[in-house]
Image: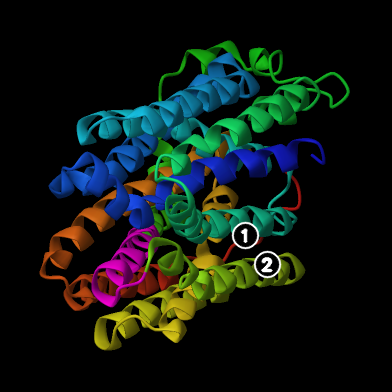
Amino acid sequence: MRTVFPSLLVVLLLATLDTTLTGTVAPALVAELGGGARVGLVVIAYATASTLTIPLWGRAGDLRGHGRILLVALAVFLLGSACCGAARDMAQLVAARTVQGLGAGGLMVGVVTVVATLVPPRERPRYQGYVAAVTALAMIGGPLAGGWLTDLVSWRLAYLINLPLGGVAFAVLLHSARRTPPAAASARRTPPAAANPDNADHSLPAEQRRSLAIVPLRLLGVRNFVLTGLLAPLQGAVMLSAVTYLPLHLQRHQGVGAAASGMLLLPLLGASVAASFAAGRLISATGRYKLVLVAGTSLTAAGAAAVALTGVSLPAMATIGLGGGMLMQLVTLVAQNSVPAADVGVASGAGPFLRQLGGVAGVALTGALYETGSLGPAFAALTALAAAAVVVACLIEELPLRATTG
C-alpha cells in the first residue's frame, strides 16, 4: 500500500484537475477560439464522458487486470490532453475533451477501488482523508492553476501541463503495478507475496468473469447503497457548479483576472482539506459516520443559501468547502460498508459515477439559470438540491464499520 498509494494520488490529481479548470480559462479560450455559446460543452463533454465510462472501466479491470486497464486509461487521458492543447476551434476542443474524459473515467474508478480492496472500512477513513484532500485540492486548485497558467502563458498550457505530470505518473504506476495488486480479486484471493495486477484477476471464478452485470439487482434492496446513490449526485451538482461558476462570475462582473478568481476560491479549498482530514480521523476513532454526513450536507446547504441571498463571500465559500470536504469520500465509504466484500467494486464505482452524473446536470442547470448574469437564481436551485441531500443523509442507517476487507 505504501508503494501504490502515492501513485494513486497522482492519478486522481490529474483526473480531477481537468474537471474544474475550465471556469477560469473559459474567457481566454473563447477569445481565441470563438464559440462562446458552446463553452459549457467544454465542461459537459469531459464530465459526461468520464461519468458514463466509470462502470465500463471498472468491469474491464475485473476481466483484464486493474493495473493494466489503469495504465490504458492514463494513456487515453494524456492523448486527450495533447489534443486539447492543439485544438484550433471550439468543436475540436470539445472533441478533445471528450477523449480526455474517456480516460479520466478509468482513473477515477481505479483509485477508489484499490483503496477499498486493500484497506478495511474501519481504517479506510485515514487513507480516504488524503484522497479527499487531493480531490479538494484539485477541485479548487484546478481553477487556480488554470487561471495562473492562462495569465502567465496561454490557456493551452492548462491542458498540456498534464503531459509531463502524466508521464511521471505513468512510470510510477507501471513500477508499482508489477509488485502490488490493484484488483479486488487479488486482494481477497491471492497471497500478498505472489500477487500482481495481471495474474490476480485471472483467479476470479469463471462464472463471475462471464457475468455482464455491472450493478447486481440485489444491491437495489440494500438501504444505504440506494440512499448513497441519491446523495452522491446531489453533492456533485452543488460542488462542481460552485467551482465552475463562482470564478466565472468573479471575472465577468467584478473585473477579477483569471488567476485572481482562482485565488479567491482558496477559502473553499482550505476548508475542504481541513474538513476531510478531521472527518477521517473522527470516523476512524469512533467508528461512527452519520453525524458527519448530516453535518456535511447541512453546511453545504447553508453555504449555497448564503451565496444565493448575499452573493459571493469568503464565509459562504468556506462553508461550502467545509461541507464538501466532510462528504467527499464518506459517501463512497458508507456505500462500500453496506455491501458484501464481493460487491465492493460496484460500490466503489457507484459513488464517482453518480457524483459526476450529478455534476453534469448541476452545471447544465446552473448555466441555464445564470444566463441573467446573477448567481441568485442559480444558487437558489443549488440550495434546494443541497437541502434534499440533508434529508437523504438523515435517512441513512449507521452500520458498524467492518474491521476487515473480507
Numbered disc in front, either 1 or 2: 1
Quadrant housing the C terminus: top right
Task: Give the overall secondary structure of the magenta segment.
Answer: helix
Asked if the residue at tag 2 contacts the one at tag 1, i.e. Cβ–Cβ closer than 8 Å, the answer is yes
Q: Is residue 284 above or below residue 4?
A: below
Indicate the colouring scheme: rainbow
Report the residue marked by disc 1.
Answer: 133
User: Quarter holding the N terminus?
Assistant: top right
Q: Earlier in the sequence, mark 1 or mark 2?
A: 1
Q: Is residue 303 left or right of residue 385?
A: right
**Range shown magenta:** 234-256
Q: Residue at x 73, y 64 (%)?
A: 284
Q: Is residue 279 left or right of residue 93?
A: right
Q: With respect to residue 49, does 235 lie above or below? A: below
Count how many numbered circles sit on residues in the image.
2
Mark 1 → mark 2, Cα distance in angstroms: 7 Å
Q: Position of residue 366 (x, y in %)?
A: 22, 62
Q: Amino acid at mark 2?
A: Phe
- Residue 358 visible in this rendered orientation of the protein: no
Secondary structure under the numbered disc 2 in the rendered image: helix
Q: Is residue 250 magenta?
A: yes
Judging by the rendered image, the residue that carries numbered circle 2 is 277
Residue 60: within the magenta?
Answer: no
x, y percent for residue 336: 57, 48
- Give the secondary structure at mark 1: helix
Percent coordinates x, y for residue 76 in the rendering: 47, 23
Query: Which is nearer the eye, 200 or 386?
Result: 386
Q: How many C-alpha atoms fall within 10 Å of the one at disc 2: few (<14), some, or many (≥20)?
A: many
Residue shown at 31%/39% (left/top)?
Answer: 48
Q: Tell which of 362 and 376 is nearer to you.
A: 376
